Image: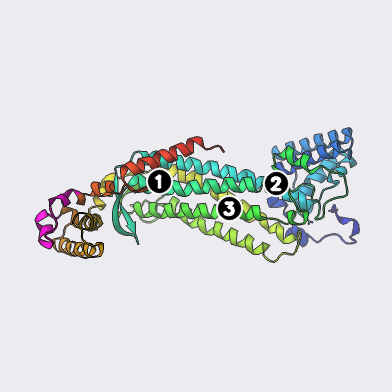
């Protein structure tokens, strides 16, 4: 197959080279951005008097036909065309004749691919942010029903202090809020046009970069062409944004896996989002959260892979950069399906509040409240109060009961400065509601957080 760049070559390319060199099998998903970019470019060439009205019209009509062929599946992708840019230009020229060759005036594939990929990534930043919003909406809705459902708050995976389930869920709402903001900021930061940088140094043609930038909705034009044609920070950013978001999803997934076990029994995933075992008929496995946790590995890998590709590249464009796309596409696909299935799994899971409250009876969750009481009410230095409480815990262990179930007599025997006013402090609900400091778990504070997130979601413009 004759290459578009074959002018200076005497031998034709080997088919092994075609297989190795081509990006067409994966970059064709950028076809929409590519055709829109070419359309804006030719309009600018026309406005600048570089192509005539007739030529411009013919090229735009041809591009529209190419778009139609791609979308209805009749476009034939040849690996020998190397990449989508050349495949589209070649088909265009077949449709409109030699005038198609004018499209590439004042342009290189280097700025062309930078435009296509950047615009695709910007669009995906916003689409992913919208999917996160849907997950957050489910989380906030579930949270709104559980501001008084007790669950053991843990550190080191050991029971620590009672919190409410809404407070626990809203910790994830906080993570997802940061994620949404990160995706939005990347979309905004990178919204500058590479078009017109040509191969690396700009062009002698009298182009108007601002015009093409505006027609795409870019906020401006890049400053330095040499940087722009080999800048892939926007791709690294979305990879990092996705990796961080998937890390959050993975943490939540880990909890869902634990909570679905017999040992916890806090939640039961819907049958539609759980799977069975091929040998053990009784099994119901949490494959969805497990896979979400597992897929975090591949998105981390994609980030590290592109950082490694970019490291050490001399200016400006190098073919190494073609390796930027598959990992980004894979991370985007992974993020999109992960968010969709997470939303469904959360929305359909059953919450077993009884098991959560039962679990709060294990592990002396109100021990800190006793120490706080001794410090505040009996004016005992906190260190000493901590030690006395340790004795109380040891006594409760001997009796085989939780600190919250100890009688006043038992407490008083250990330290006579303890009076009856301690008793309500040890009740788990009171313990949770005592933590009224800003951002704390007390139901009043959790309700503030709930209102904050409801407001955030309502006002969010994406
Ligand atoms: N397929 C290439 C890529 O994805 C397009 C740019 C090629 N430019 C070049 N001078 N070889 O990066």
Q: In this view of the protein, which residue sits in the foreground, 80 or 256?
A: 256
Question: What residue would you read off at disc 3?
Answer: 331
Q: Could you tell me which secondary element the residue under label 2 belongs to?
A: strand
Q: Where is residue 210 in the image (x, y as percent from the top left)?
A: 77, 41
Q: Which of marks 3 and 2 is nearer the N terminus?
A: 2
Residue at x 33%, y 57% (from the top left corner): 154
Q: Position of residue 190 (x, y in %)?
A: 66, 48
Question: What residue would you read off at disc 1?
Answer: 170
- Left or right? Give the position of 201 relative to 352: right
How far is the residue under mark 3 from the one under mark 2?
Answer: 23 Å
How far is the residue under mark 1 from the one under mark 3?
Answer: 26 Å
Question: Residue 215: which numbered mark, if any?
Answer: none
Q: State the extent of the magenta-drawn residues as a range.
A: 406-424
Q: In this view of the protein, which residue sits in the foreground, 19 or 248?
A: 248
Residue 409 among those drawn in magenta: yes
Count the marks: 3
């Amino acid at each position: 197959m004759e290459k578009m760049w074959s002018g200076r070559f005497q031998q034709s390319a080997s088919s092994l080279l075609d297989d190795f060199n081509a990006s067409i099998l994966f970059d064709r998903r950028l076809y929409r951005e590519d055709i829109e970019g070419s359309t804006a470019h030719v309009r600018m060439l026309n406005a600048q008097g570089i192509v005539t009205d007739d030529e411009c019209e013919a090229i735009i009509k041809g591009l529209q036909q190419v778009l139609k062929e791609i979308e209805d599946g009749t476009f034939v992708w040849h690996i020998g065309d190397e990449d989508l840019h050349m495949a589209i230009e070649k088909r265009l020229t077949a449709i409109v004749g030699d005038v198609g060759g004018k499209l590439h005036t004042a342009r290189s594939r280097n700025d062309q691919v930078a435009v296509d990929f950047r615009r695709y990534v910007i669009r995906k930043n916003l689409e992913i942010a919208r999917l996160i919003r849907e997950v957050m909406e489910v989380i906030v809705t579930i949270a709104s029903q559980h501001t008084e459902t007790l669950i053991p708050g843990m550190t080191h995976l050991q029971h620590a202090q009672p919190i409410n389930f809404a407070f626990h869920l809203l910790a994830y709402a906080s993570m997802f809020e940061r994620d949404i903001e990160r995706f939005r900021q990347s979309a905004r930061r990178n919204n500058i046009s590479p078009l017109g940088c040509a191969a690396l140094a700009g062009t002698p043609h009298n182009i108007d970069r601002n015009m093409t930038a505006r027609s795409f909705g870019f906020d401006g034009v890049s400053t330095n062409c040499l940087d722009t044609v080999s800048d892939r920070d926007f791709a690294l950013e979305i990879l990092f944004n996705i990796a961080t978001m998937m890390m959050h999803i993975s943490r939540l997934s880990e909890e869902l896996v634990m909570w679905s076990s017999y040992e916890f029994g806090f939640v039961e995933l819907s049958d539609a989002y759980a799977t069975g075992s091929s040998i053990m008929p009784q099994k119901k496995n949490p494959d969805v959260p497990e896979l979400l946790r597992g897929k975090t590995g591949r998105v981390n890998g994609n980030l590290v892979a592109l950082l490694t590709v970019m490291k050490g590249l001399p200016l400006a464009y190098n073919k190494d950069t073609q390796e930027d796309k598959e990992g980004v596409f894979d991370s985007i696909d992974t993020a999109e399906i992960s968010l969709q299935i997470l939303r469904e799994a959360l929305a359909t899971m059953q919450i077993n509040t009884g098991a959560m409250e039962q679990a709060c009876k294990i592990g002396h969750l109100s021990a800190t409240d006793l120490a706080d009481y001794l410090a505040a009410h009996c004016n005992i230095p906190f260190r000493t109060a901590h030690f006395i409480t340790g004795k109380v815990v040891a006594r409760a262990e001997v009796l085989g009961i939780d600190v919250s179930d100890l009688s006043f007599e038992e407490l008083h025997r250990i330290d006579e400065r303890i009076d009856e006013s301690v008793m309500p402090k040890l009740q788990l609900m009171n313990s949770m509601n005592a933590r009224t400091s800003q951002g704390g778990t007390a139901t009043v504070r959790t309700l503030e957080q709930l209102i904050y997130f409801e407001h955030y979601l309502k006002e969010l413009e994406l």
